[in-house]
């Protein structure tokens, strides 16, 4: 179990003291001392699905790209079509290696024609910044901006009703995957209609020195809806039910967007970008393996890293596996040979040494909210 | 928090002995570290367990953890209620949510286990 002695070397968000005060269970998450749960993963997960939850995601990284050729740089280092974005619009995308595999998955926000704001994974932020800077042969400036922002995710059907109490910004006018620059409690903030839970919600980028005041105000504003502070445990089960990829699990430097079921973020017609040639070749030849979602059929819970077999032959590994608190099923994701990844395929998961449990490939996402 | 008349393993099981029968469970600390418990796998009645060897497992939303037998012996009863309501392990780990009852093969094994004071010191050192 965890030893607290090592925490001195871990990074902390501006909300670290608030988490300790709330009695959160803290863990080392990629070098950050982060809350994994407060009231319990199931309670927090259900709060987000049915009411509202608040997450500290300040460990996420921010990178800003400015200049006359900011768009050209973003277009070159990402596979999605950033040129299609309008001011105040966001897009799911990636940074790819020339081989077509992931440096990271990211959100690209267009602030203005000459200003883009990227949200990237915590453990990749230094690598991502170095990668973009190394590929910057454009008239653009790449700024590592993580220390300028704390990030709070307010997620759930009552998220808008909660945030609305704290801002004059008209949230109803911000469509899904759009954002506004406004204020929260009188503090400049980016209010983005985005999230990583499969639920409606907002992600608030605020100055670090105001984070605790805003955190407490969100909890107070959401009290009438039964808001819960939520940790990384529920964040993981929520994103898994919604089949959202997690870097280091479904995607990494050995996986391409086509294999990960993310072909929608690859736009060949937009022109050159890093990874384009390799991906075009893979698209023509077809992928050998494909990410599949499965449900356990008998007793047993799949966990990250468990061996998957088909008919006694090794077929892959579980990338993410867990009980799904809202669906009340045991689910998971794994890579399978492309010709064995269809819905209905029976697979076996080694849940203990020499003990197999049956599972079946199912339609994904496992959970989709009603809109 | 930790009853004085129980004995404890370093792996966070407890045993309370009445005559030749020992009742076994997991500690408050164990359930707290695991979080929401969703599945318990227990040995069958009549099976033999060995001191400090695996006898089953407990799974929470985020992790799976082996169960270790505090002593050697024969399983004489299992708490079947935990199949339907594993969350009871989070609510009453030292009482209603006991796991198994074991007929002790060698009561002297109890001397190898931690007293309540020693266990408190053990988890204190681990979490302080």
Image (cartoon, coloured by chain):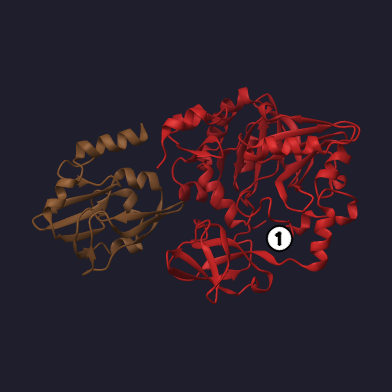
Q: Residue at x 40, y 42 (%)?
A: A1
Considering the numbered disc 1 on the image, is that residue within a helix, a strand or a loop?
loop
* Of B121 and A97, the residue lying toward us: A97
* Quarter holding residue A115: top right
Residue A158 at x, y percent in the picture: 59, 45
The colour one sees for chain B in the rendered image is brown
- Tell me the chain of label 1: A
Q: Residue at x 32, y 55 (%)?
A: B67
Q: Is residue A10 above or below residue B88?
A: above
Asked whether the viewer can see residue A131, the reply is yes
Q: Which chain is red in the picture?
A: A
Q: How many marks?
A: 1
Q: Is residue A315 left or right of residue A67?
A: left
* Of A233 and A45, the residue lying toward us: A233
Residue A71 at x, y percent in the picture: 87, 39
Q: Is residue A253 left or right of residue A213?
A: right
Outermost left residue:
B19
Residue A291 at x, y percent in the picture: 65, 62
Quarter occupied by the C terminus of chain A: bottom right
Q: Residue at x 65, y 45 (%)?
A: A195
Which residue does the numbered mark 1 point to in the structure image? A261
Q: Residue at x 39, y 48 (%)?
A: B34
Residue A3 at x, y percent in the picture: 41, 36
Q: Is residue A105 left or right of residue B106?
A: right
* Quarter holding residue A187: top right
Q: Residues within 10 Å of mark 1 (few under 14, many from 20)?
A: some
Outermost bottom residue:
A311
* Quarter holding residue B49: bottom left
């Amino acid at each position: 179990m965890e030893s607290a002695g090592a925490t001195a070397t871990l990074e902390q968000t501006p909300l670290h003291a608030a988490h300790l005060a709330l009695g959160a269970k803290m863990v080392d998450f990629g070098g950050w001392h982060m809350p994994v749960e407060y009231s319990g993963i199931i309670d927090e997960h259900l709060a987000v699905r049915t009411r509202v939850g608040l997450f500290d995601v300040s460990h996420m990284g921010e990178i800003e790209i400015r200049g006359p050729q900011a768009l050209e740089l973003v277009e070159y280092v990402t596979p999605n079509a950033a040129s299609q974005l309008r001011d105040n619009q966001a897009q799911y995308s990636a940074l790819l290696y020339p081989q077509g595999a992931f440096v990271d998955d990211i959100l690209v926000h267009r602030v203005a024609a000459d200003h883009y704001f990227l949200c990237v994974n915590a453990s990749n932020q230094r690598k991502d910044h170095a990668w973009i800077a190394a590929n910057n042969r454009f008239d653009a400036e790449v700024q590592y901006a993580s220390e300028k922002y704390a990030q709070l995710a307010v997620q759930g059907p009552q998220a808008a009703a909660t945030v609305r109490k704290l801002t004059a910004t008209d949230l109803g006018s911000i469509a899904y995957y759009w954002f506004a620059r406004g204020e929260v409690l009188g503090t400049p903030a980016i209010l983005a209609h985005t999230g990583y839970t499969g639920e409606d919600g907002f992600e608030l980028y605020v100055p670090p020195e105001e984070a605790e005041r805003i955190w407490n105000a969100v909890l107070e504003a959401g009290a009438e809806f039964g808001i819960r502070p939520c940790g990384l445990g529920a964040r993981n089960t929520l994103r898994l039910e919604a089949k959202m990829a997690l870097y280091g699990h479904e995607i990494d430097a050995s996986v391409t967007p086509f294999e990960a079921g993310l072909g929608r973020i690859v736009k060949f017609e937009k022109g050159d970008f890093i990874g384009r040639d390799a991906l075009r070749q893979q698209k023509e030849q077809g992928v050998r393996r494909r990410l599949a979602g499965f449900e356990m059929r008998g007793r047993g819970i799949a966990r990250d890293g468990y061996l998957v077999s088909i008919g006694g032959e090794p077929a892959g590994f579980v990338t993410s596996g867990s009980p799904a608190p809202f669906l009340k099923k045991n689910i998971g994701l794994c890579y399978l040979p492309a010709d064995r990844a269809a819905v209905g395929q029976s697979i076996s998961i080694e849940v203990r040494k020499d003990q197999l449990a049956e599972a079946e490939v199912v339609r994904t996402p496992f959970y989709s909210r009603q809109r | 928090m930790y009853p004085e008349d129980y004995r404890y393993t370093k792996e966070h099981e407890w045993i309370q002995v009445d005559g030749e029968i020992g009742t076994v469970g997991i500690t408050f600390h164990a359930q707290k570290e695991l979080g929401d418990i969703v599945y318990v796998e227990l040995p069958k009645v009549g099976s033999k367990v060995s001191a400090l060897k695996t006898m089953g497992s407990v799974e929470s939303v985020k992790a799976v953890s082996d169960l270790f037998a505090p002593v050697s012996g024969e399983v004489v009863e299992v708490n079947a209620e935990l199949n339907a309501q594993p969350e009871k392990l989070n609510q009453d780990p030292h009482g209603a949510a006991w796991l198994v009852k074991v007929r002790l093969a060698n009561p002297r094994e109890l001397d190898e286990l931690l007293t309540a004071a020693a266990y408190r010191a053990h988890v204190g050192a681990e979490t302080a």
